[in-house]
Structures are given as structure tokens and as C-alpha cells.
Image: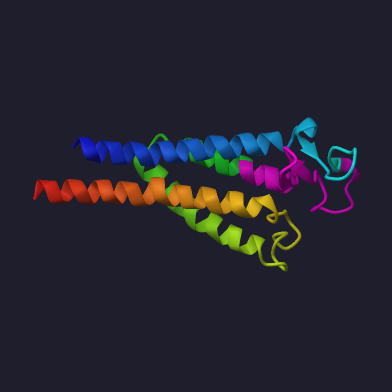
Amino acid sequence: MENINAGNMTERYCALIVGMLFLILGLAGFIPALVTLPGTDASYVPFDASPSAYAKGFGYVFGLFPTNFLHNLVHCAVGVFGIASYSDLNSARLFNRFFAVAYIAIAILGVVPVANTMFNLMPIFGNNVWFNALTAIAVAYYGIIIPAKVKGASVSQSS
């Protein structure tokens, strides 16, 4: 019974930690002091001065991760879903599985030149590629693989 609870908590904490990480990253993208344009003195492209939806709020969060207004909204939504899924094991499991698959796909799109701006909606290139890939791999491992091993070990012990 102890192994099963450990696996359940791993899945839930994985969703919670990823949710908090993405919510913080999304909120940071809305704070002009944390968003910069490389090679300039400007912070970010102001929302009202943007010529296109893609350029609205464009900049680099912490000088590392390309982002824009829509990208920040997506990060906040993913964060809220991750945090909310923590309360229930089935929700956390569903979040972890969906996140792992979706973010591996997004990381792959980030290296495809035609798709690395999510078709002119949001930037998924540069440091976003490795960040998305690493978080997806971590979620797959801690939220899917380890709980499956714990469950498999507890089933074989009870037989």
C-alpha cells in the first residue's frame, strides 16, 4: 500500500510543480522589467504598438525564452491546469500524459523552420525548444514511468 501512495503522490506533485513553473513563467512574461529584446535597450514590444498579433508583447523572458502575449496566456493556462489537477490523482495523471505528449510535439515543431513560430501565433524556437523538451521528458518520467513501475512492483508483491 505504501508503494501505491508514493506513486500517486509522485504523479500529483509532478503536475503541481510543472503547473507552478509554467504559471510563474507565464506571469513573468507580462512583467515588462523581466522581458527584453536582445541587442537593444528596449524591454519588449508594447501591446498597443504591435503591428501584428505575433509581435504583441514580443520579447525574451529573463533574456532567455522568446515569448509574446499569446505565449504568456498559454503558459498561464497550462500552469493553472497543472495546479488544479494536483487535487485529484486521475486529473494529475491526465495532465501529465497530455503535457508530455503535447510538449514533445511542441519541441519538435520548434526546430522546424516553417512551424517554429506556431504558424505566426507564438514563438517556440530558441531556448524554448530545450525547455519544452526537458520538461516533457521530466513529466513523462516522474508522472508516467515511475508511477507505472511503482504500480507494477506492488502488483507483483501482492501476487
Q: How many marks?
A: 0
Residue name at image x 80 percent, y 46 percent: 58
Q: Residue furthest front?
A: 39
* Spot occupied by residue 129 in the image (x, y as percentages of width and height): 63, 55
- Residue shown at the point (56%, 61%) measured from the top left: 105
Residue 55 higher or lower than 2, as above or below = below
Q: How is the image coloured?
A: rainbow
Residue 70 within the segment the image draws in magenta: yes
**Image quarter of residue 38:** top right
Residue 35 higher or lower than 58, as above or below: above
Q: Quadrant of the N terminus?
A: top left
The image shows residue 31 at horizontal and vertical percentages of: 75, 32
The answer to which quarter of the image holds residue 108 is bottom right
Residue at coordinates 69% horizontally, 60% vertically from top-left? 118
Residue 38 relative to residue 66: left or right: right
Residue depicted at 73% across the width and 47% down the height: 67
- Seen in the picture, residue 4 relative to 127 is either above or below; the reply is above
Segment tinted magenta in the rendering: 48-75
Q: Is residue 94 left or right of residue 113?
A: left
Decide whether residue 111 is among the magenta residues.
no
- 66 displayed left or right of 80: right
- Residue 158 pos. (x, y %): 10, 46
